[in-house]
Image: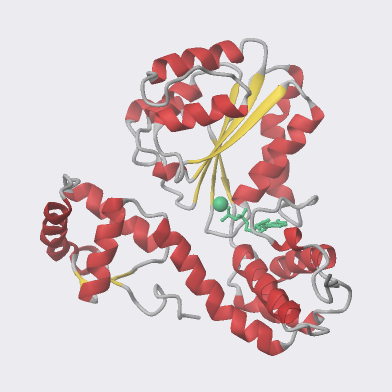
């Protein structure tokens, strides 16, 4: 039998993206506001719902999971559930996953059960309990009416999360008014020092002592443009490369090799998650190099015909373009009628 002894990585889980750290580094202000908004739950009162927005890698997902787990550990009567709306965009899927998380054993025929029925089961489950529901990437919801229904439910606190600060701007006025008292919390990009501290903390837990130099951590922090996900992925890939080559420490070359890989895989991940319309539009932009929105629509209609799907309206196509730009898959240049979209250098992940 072979025996392997790690020389670099102490605990690989700690370096993974989904890992919820046992302590949050910085973000004290946001943590306090979120905890204060949820505090009424301790007295069985209605919590204040929140809308959390900020660029990718600013800790929105990790902190919302951290705080809700902390709360449930404190008060076991409070349930919590995290749903990523990119994975579960429909009302049915969201309610279904909430009920599953809340341990409701259901004889639900996955497709046949109407959502009203799921809402009723949900209400019953909450008769003597309270809950916090996190809807991450809330801009991906298929139908925003679910926000209206959830916001009006007693015993439910909502944490809505998006990269897009205007995610709730386009919702139906009735939905918006039901969300009028929602507390908006901004997660700005991290400073160099904050990223450095997050990296140092994770290196301490995840790596063996002395395998990465202070100057290397600083370097990674500097090139991560305030995005903790990029920073941690660079550190993880560099550490894995050093481990695989049976080195005693992480070299600068391991870090240099990890940098472009992180950007490419971020992009791959984003394209995998596109829906079919977003994918067609992205395909057209990639092929044409640079395109104006008005030239894009006819191409998009052709693609729909070819794929046998009904096209979405022009306004939704524009919204979709904004989304692709926001996820840095395409580059938007110019304003108003001069605006063009391309799969530019930065959008292709080669920038900075
Ligand atoms: N303040 C923080 N302290 C510790 N780890 C953090 C912090 N902020 C982000 N991270 C880590 O950085 C990565 C990206 O954060 P995430 O919450 O997924 O960002 P977002 O949801 O804003 O895109 C995650 O692995 C997370 O654990
Ligand atoms: Mg997130």
In the depicted structure, whether residue 316 falls above or below residue 157? below
In x, y percent, where is residue 49?
A: 57, 31
Residue depicted at 69% across the width and 67% down the height: 195
Ligand 1's image quarter is bottom right
Q: Is residue 311 left or right of residue 84?
A: left
Q: Nearer the viewer, residue 100 or 231?
A: 100
**Which quadrant of the structure image shows residue 31?**
top right
In the depicted structure, whether residue 110 falls above or below residue 126? below
Residue depicted at 80% across the width and 65% down the height: 206
How many discs appear? Answer: 0
Camera sees residue 345: yes
Give the colouring mode of the picture: secondary structure
Q: Is residue 289 left or right of residue 71?
A: left
Q: Nearer the viewer, residue 328 or 248?
A: 248
- State the quadrant of the N terminus: bottom right
Residue depicted at 51% across the width and 73% down the height: 263
In x, y percent, where is residue 318?
A: 25, 54
Residue depicted at 60% across the width and 84% down the height: 257
Residue ranking furthest to the right:
209
In x, y percent, where is residue 210?
A: 87, 78
**Which quadrant of the structure image shows residue 204?**
bottom right
Camera sees residue 191: no
In the depicted structure, whether residue 277 falls above or below residue 78? below
In x, y percent, where is residue 42?
A: 76, 23
Q: Is residue 273 left or right of residue 284?
A: right
């Amino acid at each position: 039998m072979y025996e392997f002894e790690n020389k670099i990585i102490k605990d690989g889980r700690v370096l993974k993206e989904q890992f919820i750290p046992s302590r949050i580094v910085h973000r004290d202000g946001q943590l306090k506001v979120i905890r204060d908004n949820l505090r009424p739950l301790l007295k069985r009162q209605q919590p204040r719902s929140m809308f959390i927005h900020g660029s990718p890698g600013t800790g929105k997902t990790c902190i919302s999971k951290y705080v809700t787990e902390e709360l449930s550990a404190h008060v076991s009567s409070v349930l919590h559930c995290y749903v990523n709306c990119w994975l579960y965009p429909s009302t049915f899927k969201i309610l279904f996953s909430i009920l599953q998380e809340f341990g409701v054993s259901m004889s639900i025929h996955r497709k046949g059960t109407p959502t009203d029925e799921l809402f009723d089961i949900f209400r019953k489950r909450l008769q003597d309990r309270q809950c916090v529901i996190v809807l991450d990437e809330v801009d991906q919801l298929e139908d925003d009416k679910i926000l209206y229904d959830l916001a009006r439910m007693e015993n439910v606190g909502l944490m809505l999360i998006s990269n897009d600060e205007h995610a709730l701007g386009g919702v139906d006025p009735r939905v918006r008014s039901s969300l009028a008292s929602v507390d908006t919390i901004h997660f700005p990009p991290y400073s160099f020092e904050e990223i450095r501290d997050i990296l140092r903390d994770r290196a301490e837990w995840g790596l063996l002592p002395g395998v990465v130099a202070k100057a290397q951590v600083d370097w990674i922090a500097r090139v991560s443009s305030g995005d903790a996900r990029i920073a941690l992925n660079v550190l993880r890939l560099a550490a894995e490369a050093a481990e695989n080559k049976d080195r005693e420490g992480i070299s600068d070359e391991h870090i240099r090799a990890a940098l472009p890989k992180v950007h490419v895989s971020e992009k791959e991940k984003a394209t995998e998650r596109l829906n079919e319309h977003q994918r067609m539009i992205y395909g057209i932009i990639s092929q044409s190099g640079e395109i104006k929105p008005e030239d894009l629509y006819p191409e998009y209609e052709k693609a729909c015909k070819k794929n046998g799907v009904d096209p979405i309206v022009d306004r939704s196509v524009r919204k979709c373009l904004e989304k692709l730009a926001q996820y840095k898959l395409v580059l938007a240049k110019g304003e108003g009628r001069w605006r063009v979209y391309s799969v530019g250098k930065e959008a292709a992940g080669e920038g900075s």
